[in-house]
Amino acid sequence: MSAPFVELVEPVSAVEPSKISCRDTAAQALGVVRDGVITGEGPTTKGRVHFSRELDAADAAWCARILTATAVEHQPVSRAEAEALFEINDAAAERSDNGRFDDLLAKAVVHHAASASGLPVPPRTVALSPETLIESWAPTRSVGVNTEVLEWIASQMRGKHRSNRTLMRLVATLVGVASLPLVHLPNVFDIGM
């Protein structure tokens, strides 16, 4: 008896927002973006010059389109999606996106943390928009925030060469160390700045 036929999905279709069916496929699509950032090749880099280990505005736009696909618009950002964003962040040694990815990363991680803690979050297109200030919807104090989620975020940030100041500030506020000057936060999270 022959092995069952497995249909292989064309990688480029896997990242198209119209093909995102759930948070799992969104996380997988973010993995394709990560691979493109690492190698400088692949479906998310077609038709443009892209150097390996560089994150540019088009990469950040791919991430935003994936995270705000219609199928996931009204669902909170999942841990798998947030982990994929941290992987993209780690993969990018160079940046030419004018800070868009850092903004998206901070908002997506806080969206996940708030929702995983049972706190209300706005739809993704609102929460992740560059025009929306994260302070307009993110929790501003630790009441109700799940400690395990905060520990997970800190573990993702610990020892990284590239830090996200917005995310560090929000996490610090949530764990009650906001009174420390920003320069001391790397010591709190053991992060190199």
Image (spheres, helix red, strand yellow):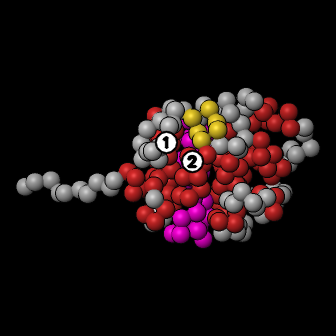
Q: Mark 2: which amino acid?
A: Ala
| Residue 39 spot, x, y in % from top left | 46, 34
Q: Which residue is mark 2?
A: 58
Residue placed at 32% from the left, 55% from the top? 9
**Disc 1 crowd, CA 10 A, few/some/many (<14, 14-19, 20+):** few
Residue placed at 75% from the left, 60% from the top? 131
Residue placed at 72% from the left, 41% from the top? 164
| Residue 114 spot, x, y in % from top left | 71, 60
| Residue 155 spot, x, y in % from top left | 65, 40
Residue 106, can we see it? Answer: no
Judging depth in this view, the residue of 5 and 190 nearest the camera is 5
Quarter of the image for residue 185 reads: top right
Q: Residue furthest left?
A: 1
Q: Earlier in the sequence, mark 2 or mark 1?
A: 1
Q: Nearer the viewer, mark 2 or mark 1?
A: 1
Quarter of the image for residue 65 reads: bottom right
- 53 versus 127 height, above or below: above
Q: Mark 1: which amino acid?
A: Arg
Task: Tell whether position 114 is magenta.
Answer: no
Q: Which residue is mark 1?
A: 48
Residue 11 numbered tag:
none
Judging depth in this view, the residue of 110 and 165 nearest the camera is 165
Q: Which residues are magenta?
A: 67-91
Q: Pick the quarter of the image with the C terminus.
A: top right
**Disc 2 crowd, CA 10 A, few/some/many (<14, 14-19, 20+):** some
Task: Tell whether position 89 is magenta.
Answer: yes
Q: Is residue 47 left or right of residue 57?
A: left
In contact (CB < 8 Å): disc 2 and disc 1: yes
By secondary structure, the bulk of the magenta-drawn segment is best described as helix
